[in-house]
Every structure is written in C-alpha cells, then in structure tokens.
Amino acid sequence: MTDYHKLLGVEKNASKEEIKKAYEMQVDKMKKEVVNEKRLNQFLKIFDEAYEALISLEENQSVKENLTVAINPKEIQKEKEYSNEEEAYKGRRNSRSKAKGSGGKSNNLKRKETSRNKERKNSLNDDKEEKGRKQRAAEKKSQNDTKKAFNLIMLPFKILAFPFIVVLSVIIAVLQVINIISWIATKVLIVGSISVGAIHLYQVKMGQAINYNILILAGAVLLASFFLPYILKLLLKVLQTINDVLKGFVF
C-alpha cells in the first residue's frame, strides 16, 4: 500500500492546510524538474490521488473525533448534572415564588387584621369620647340645676338686699358731691380757723382775757379740714365696695 504521507512529505497527523501546502509544493517541484509531459502527468496523477486520499482520511478522522466528543460519557454526565442543577434551580425558584406568595398573603392578612384593630380602636375611642361628652353634659346640667335651686333659695335675700343697694347708691352719690365740695370747703375752713386763732391771740396780746374755747374750736376745725378729704375718700371706698358686693349678689 502506498504511503501517501511519505509521498507528500507530511506527518500522519497533518492538517488539511499542511496537506494542501505540501501537495502544491510537490506539484510545483515536479513541473520544474520533469520535462516530459507524459511522465509529468503520471506524477501529477499520483500526487492528486495522494492529496485526495489524505484529505478524505483527515475528514473521516475529524468526523470520528467529533462523534467521540459527542458521545463522550464524561460530557454526557456533565450534561446530566447541568440538567439536574437547572431543574433544582427551577424548583428552588418556584419554592421561593410560592413562599413569597404565601408571605404576601400573610402580609395581606396582617394588614387587614391591623386595619380591623385600628378601626376597633377608633370605634372605642369614639365611644369613649361620646361617653365623656354625655358625662360633661350631665355634669353641666346638674350644675345648672343646682345653680337654679340656689338662686331660688336666695331670692328672698336678694329682694331684701335690693333696698340697701338703692340707699347705698344714693349715699355714695351724695358723698361724691360732698367730696368735691369738701375740697373747696376745707381750704376755706383752714384759712378761717387760722385767722380766728390769730385774731384771738392778737386780742389776748392787747390785754383781752384768753378764751380757750375759741382756740380749741379753731384747732379742731383746722385738724378736721386736713383729714376730712381723706376720711370722705375712705368712707366712699368702703360704701362702694359694699354696694358692689350687694349688686353682685342680687344681679
């Protein structure tokens, strides 16, 4: 059997490119060295057979290798493992989806329960506020009733106090007028008492007997003139306070 590899000068594991390159080199070499056309054609025919045989052999070898790779048990095992991992991943994802859905339902239930609790709490607060309003209204009504009863009991005393209010109002008005007049009167009385005392002392100096009654009267008028405005103001203030208290009691 012809050794085509040796004929073309290539290794047994040569690739297509190497075989083609070696074939073209041998053909070019023969064309340069062989002059006889008949012999050249014979050589070229042999090289063509070698080239086709080696190319065919190399292609068959590639197919075998591809088939070997395709049916490699290790690759099949890896493919199975990958498929199993893919199935496991899908299972975990579905489990998480279910858990998430279950968690979502649980969260919805919790939110609904929280909403119901809030509504119940608001309802209780409303009831409590309503009870508080009713209680305050009842207390206010009770206070009003008590106040009415007290006013009814005090009505006779108010009727009796009314004349005192009228009398005090008149007295206060008179005292206010007197207070205004006293401001002028006290000035006149002060001047008069001093004048009377001075005249009597002059008469005593001229030889007339001393009259203590005149001096005492002049001194009393002088003191009264000094303190009368203050006494009137104090009396007016006291009467005004009493009158205000009686008015507050009656009205």
Image: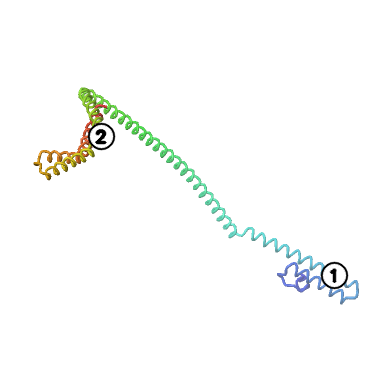
Q: Nearer the viewer, mark 2 or mark 1?
A: 2
Question: Percent x, y for residue 52?
Answer: 79, 65
| Above-or-below relation of 88 to 113 | below
Question: Percent x, y for residue 59?
Answer: 73, 63
Q: How many marks?
A: 2
Residue at the spot 21% in from the left edge and 36% down from the top edge? 232
The image quarter containing residue 85 is: bottom right
Q: Which of the pair 62/91 is nearer the observer?
A: 91
Judging from the image, the colouring scheme is rainbow
| Residue indicated by mark 2 | 181
| Above-or-below relation of 134 to 228 | above
Q: Residue furthest bottom?
A: 33
Of labels 2 and 1, earlier in sequence is 1
Q: Residues within 10 Å of mark 2 (few under 14, many from 20)?
A: few
The answer to whether residue 158 is left or right of residue 60 is left
Residue at the spot 49% in from the left edge and 43% down from the top edge? 101
Question: Percent x, y for residue 41?
Answer: 88, 70
| Residue indicated by mark 1 | 44
Amino acid marked by disc 2: Ile
| Above-or-below relation of 83 to 157 | below
Residue at the spot 81% in from the left edge and 67% down from the top edge? 49
Under tag 1, what secondary structure? helix
Q: Which of the pair 28/208 is nearer the observer?
A: 208
Circles 2 and 1 in contact, beta carbons < 8 Å: no
